[in-house]
Image: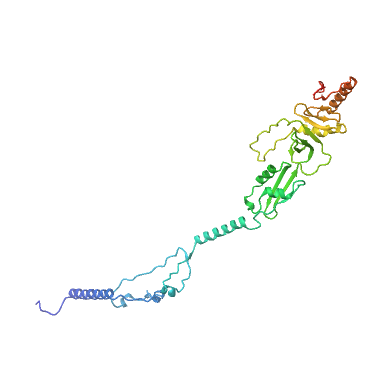
Amino acid sequence: MSPDRTTITRAEAVRLRREDEQKRREQLTQRAVAKPKLVPQSSARQKTNWPDPAQNSSTVSGPRLRRNYGMTLNAPYRQTPRFNTNFLSGMGLNMPHISYGPRWLSFILASVCLAVLYMMLNVQPFVAGDAIISGNKRVSVQEIQDVLAIKGQPIITLDPSMVENRILASFQDISSAQVDLSISQGISVTVQERIPVAAWQQPSGETFWLDANGYKFTARGQADSLPVIIAYGDPPAIQVPVDDKKTTPEVPRFIPEVLSQSIGKLSQYMPTGASLIFDPQYGIGWLDPSGLKVYFGQSFDGSSTKIKVYQALLDHLATAEIQPVMISVEYPNAPFYRIEQ
């Protein structure tokens, strides 16, 4: 065939058609890049018209372009509704984005805990007022209130054992104290005072009271028919065993318990007008109106025997016309007397 023929083969026709389609695609791409299409903000939220899958793709005219697909993922937090803030944007203000989640729950719980803690430290009835005191007779309520010093303090910070120790350390005439803490009933204090059995007069003139267990305490008020013991010296010291497990402070006894109990027994045999006396060497006894001192030792155990020996010795001295100034029957088997001081 000659080269100037006008007819082309089928292969050449296919090649030419593909070249024309490629040029058309490049022109469309350059045009789209040079002039991007502006999409309004409101249209972004409009529903996208996706092509019908049932439609035959062969009917779509024009070149085939790549499509972009948007996928919605689950947000980590629940977002609050967005408000129109265009007027704030125009003023240069930006609204913070607030979201609800576990942090909000933690913040609410922490706020509630702080509020409850503040109430328990500063608000009634979680704050202590005046204590309700009972059991006292000689010690006034105001004196105990001043020692407690708990008014206005949070109840949850008070330790009943410490309050009890404070009362016992401040008042020698209180033998026991019990403190009960309650938010509804408040603070109640029940005390038990010592019962005096004798008044002890020191050589210096100081006078205090003794109970049946040998503890001394401050004399308060008046006590009817209370025997008075005139002491010529201090009694021997009593060692108190140390107990590390015991939280209540142990108050040492002033005189042995047996000596304190002997005072009441001895006063029953004492002559009329006589007074009780105590000597650190000879023990307890009495001083009769004639000036005779009679001692029965550190205890009055075996009182009937000691009284019989005393009467027999006194009769013997009267028969012998001997005027003693001191008689001691601390040991009934070996009594003795003294003529001169």
Q: Quadrant of residue 258?
A: top right
Residue 9, how many percent across, how many down? 16, 75
Residue 87, how many percent across, how many down? 44, 75
- Which residue is farthest right? 319
Q: Residue at x 80, y 31 (%)?
A: 277
- Judge from the rendering whether residue 75 lies leftward or rightward of residue 205; answer left or right: left
Q: Is residue 136 above or below residue 246?
A: below
Along the line of sight, the residue nearer the viewer: 43 or 102: 102
- Which residue is farthest bottom? 6
Along the line of sight, the residue nearer the viewer: 221 or 109: 221
Q: Quadrant of the N terminus?
A: bottom left
Residue 312, how many percent across, how many down? 88, 23
Residue 322, how many percent across, how many down? 87, 21
Numbered label tally:
0
- Judge from the rendering whether residue 319 lies leftward or rightward of residue 182; answer left or right: right
Q: Is residue 5 above or below residue 324?
A: below
Q: Quadrant of the C terminus?
A: top right
